[in-house]
Image (cartoon, helix red, strand yellow):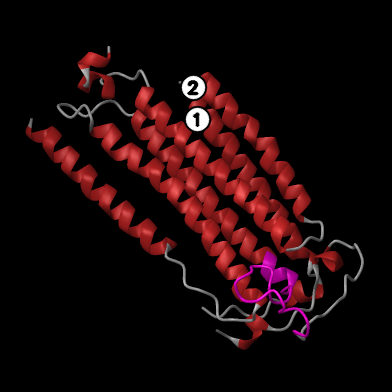
């Protein structure tokens, strides 16, 4: 469990900031993947999620600036709010999807 | 926790990004604890590398959350229906999506608690996320087995 001292990073602590920027980029790409996956069946919902991608990307660019605890906490809270919103959207898409033998077939009175 | 995990603050965000020394090392806690333990702003700014590592962990959990959402959505939208169990896909997919939302919320709470611990040079809190993830996925796996069995019997 004990990581070895990261000597290379001690020599250049900027690598930690670089890794964090890359982590934000990966997260933005993950949003793009989710949006593309939804896009197939639900174009509107998919486009909404795709529109989040540049927002998250931008949030990652702000990270590098020096800032206190509260602005950082607010930015990360925004990510959680967005992910939770995407999950709510996904549940709605799942329940309303027109796939064969979906939930609607269980509830004939909905039709 | 190994000692070198909580060495005193040596690198500030400003130093990392070339925006000035920003006060440099503030390993002494004089005058910085006035806000009290209840405030998340209390304590001293930790080594920027710890702050950044904490943030990357939060982001990694959120990518996991998004993967769960996509997996749940894929089950509902892409799988053909289980014969005889028309609600089977929703039974398996919707919990995965809900788990995704829960992982994201818990990840934020964990990030906040870890950051507060770092600010006070305190031991890092344990995360419940591995247990939540393992328990829920195990439960969904059992559900999947039941759905398959019911589907086979009918």
Where B60 sits versus A46, above or below?
below
Picture residue at 37% right of the left edge, 59% below the top:
B132
Does B32 lie within the magenta span? Answer: yes
Q: Position of residue B89 (x, y in %)?
A: 28, 33
Q: Position of residue B105 (x, y in %)?
A: 49, 52
Where A3 sits versus A25, above or below?
below
- Using the image, name the chain to which the residue with label 2 belongs: A
Q: Distance between the residues labelled 2 and 1?
A: 6 Å
Picture disc at residue A55: none
State whether discs 2 and 1 lie on one chain.
Answer: yes
Q: Do the residues labelled 2 and 1 touch (CB within 8 Å)?
A: yes
Does A68 lie within the magenta span? Answer: no
Picture residue at 69% right of the left edge, 77% below the top:
B43
Residue in the foreground of this view, choosing between A90 and B56: A90
Residue that badge 1 annotates: A37
Picture residue at 43% right of the left edge, 44% below the top:
B68
Picture residue at 72% right of the left edge, 56% below the top:
A71
As helix, strand or loop, the secondary structure at mark 2 comes to loop
Which residue of the protein is positioned furthest toward the right in this rendering? B20
Residue in the foreground of this view, choosing between B47 and B70: B47
Picture disc at residue A40: 2
The region drawn magenta spans B29-51
Where A44 sits versus B135, above or below?
above
Q: Where is residue A104 in the image (x, y as percent from the top left)?
A: 27, 20
């Amino acid at each position: 469990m004990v990581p070895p001292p990261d000597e290379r990073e001690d020599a250049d602590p900027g690598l930690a900031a670089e890794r964090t920027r890359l982590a934000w980029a990966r997260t933005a790409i993950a949003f793009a993947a989710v949006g593309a996956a939804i896009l197939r069946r639900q174009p509107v919902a998919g486009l909404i999620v795709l529109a989040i991608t540049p927002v998250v990307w931008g949030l990652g660019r702000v990270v590098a600036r020096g800032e206190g605890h509260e602005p950082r906490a607010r930015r990360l809270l925004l990510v959680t709010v967005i992910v939770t919103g995407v999950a709510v959207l996904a549940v709605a898409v799942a329940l309303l999807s027109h796939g064969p033998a979906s939930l609607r077939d269980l509830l004939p009175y909905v039709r | 926790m190994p000692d070198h995990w909580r060495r005193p603050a040596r690198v500030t965000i400003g130093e990392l990004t070339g925006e000035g020394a920003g006060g440099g090392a503030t390993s002494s806690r004089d005058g910085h604890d006035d806000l009290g333990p209840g405030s998340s702003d209390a304590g001293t700014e930790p080594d920027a590398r710890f702050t950044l590592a904490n943030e990357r962990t939060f982001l990694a959990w959120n990518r996991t959350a998004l993967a769960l959402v996509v997996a749940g959505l894929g089950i509902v939208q892409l799988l053909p229906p289980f014969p005889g169990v028309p609600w089977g896909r929703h039974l398996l997919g919707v919990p995965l999506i809900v788990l995704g939302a829960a992982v994201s919320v818990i990840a934020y709470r964990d990030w906040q608690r870890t950051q507060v611990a770092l600010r006070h040079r305190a031991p890092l809190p344990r995360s419940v996320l591995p247990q939540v993830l393992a328990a829920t996925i195990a439960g969904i796996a059992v559900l999947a087995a039941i759905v398959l069995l019911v589907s086979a019997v009918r």
